[in-house]
Amino acid sequence: MTRSAQLHPLLLALALACSQHARDSSHATMRTVRWAPPDSSPQLQSYRYSWPAGVEPAPSCRAHEVVIDADSMGPLRVGQRLATILTQCPHVLVGWDWGHEAIPEPALMVRFWSATVLVTLTDTSDTATAYYLSTSDTSLHTLDGLRVGQSVADVNKRIGPLEFLEGECGLYASSKRRPSLGIHLTTPADSLECGNLVPKPPALPRGSRVAEIFLHSAA
């Protein structure tokens, strides 16, 4: 028997042992997130606007400025697994996102200095993924300068042409140039009735500004 033939079983055994050790270490360090019932947990959608008094802010996830990209906000990305999110940003606030329709969904609030990003998850399991990222913070922006507080006319110049949609008495905008990016707008000055918020093309909703920027799956 050659020396290489003698070494092969030993190398195989060592490789299997290292692989098992890596799996054991991974399970040992993996953080388990537990969600309390929605009625007794933080309603995180409101934390995007102001951090409640008496609630200790979570430590910042990054020590530098982050930007909103095609499908990500800083290190957070649509489709990211919960375990990866916690590896990137271990200090999060666990709660629920009640959304605009008052339907609770499991969520995490992540801070970047004074800015906050709401991460809405598919479920409460360890294999959950992020399917919706949103912010109402004026300090976060896209690479081309889109940010909360801008007029709809300015948004149209940056990423337009815009398409508008009304849902649950809220006005939303999107652009085919950015299929994963959505914008929640403030109520137009000349359309105060629900059901009549979308302007007739090519008009823009007069007086509307960006209230929220969100990322979602384009599929």
Image: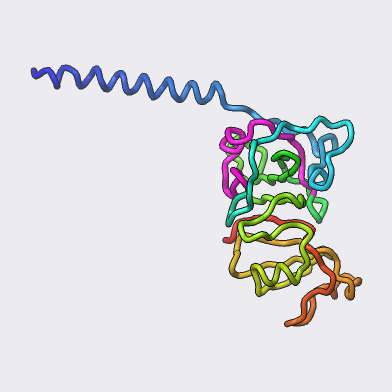
Q: Is residue 184 above or below residue 44?
A: below
Question: What colouring method underlies this structural image?
Answer: rainbow
Give the quadrant of the C terminus.
bottom right
Q: Is residue 61 above or below residue 136?
A: above
> Looking at the image, how many numbered discs can be counted on the residues?
0
Q: Nearer the viewer, residue 63 or 135?
A: 63
Q: Is residue 91 above or below residue 24?
A: below
Residue 157 in the image: state x and y as whole percent.
Answer: 68, 72
Looking at this rendering, what residue extends furthest in the left direction? 1
The picture quadrant where one finds residue 87 is top right
The picture quadrant where one finds residue 194 is bottom right
The picture quadrant where one finds residue 145 is bottom right
The question of residue 182 being in magenta is answered with no
Q: Is residue 138 left or right of residue 143?
A: right
Residue 104 in the image: state x and y as whole percent.
Answer: 78, 46
Q: Is residue 138 left or right of residue 190?
A: left
Q: Nearer the viewer, residue 42 or 184?
A: 184
Residue 73 in the image: state x and y as whole percent.
Answer: 63, 48
The question of residue 79 being in magenta is answered with yes
Bounds of the magenta segment? 74-98
Point 9% across, 19% down: residue: 2
Q: Is residue 40 left or right of residue 78?
A: right
Give the quadrant of the N terminus.
top left
Residue 126 in the image: state x and y as whole percent.
Answer: 60, 35
Q: Is residue 185 above or below residue 164?
A: above
Point 68% across, 67% down: residue: 174
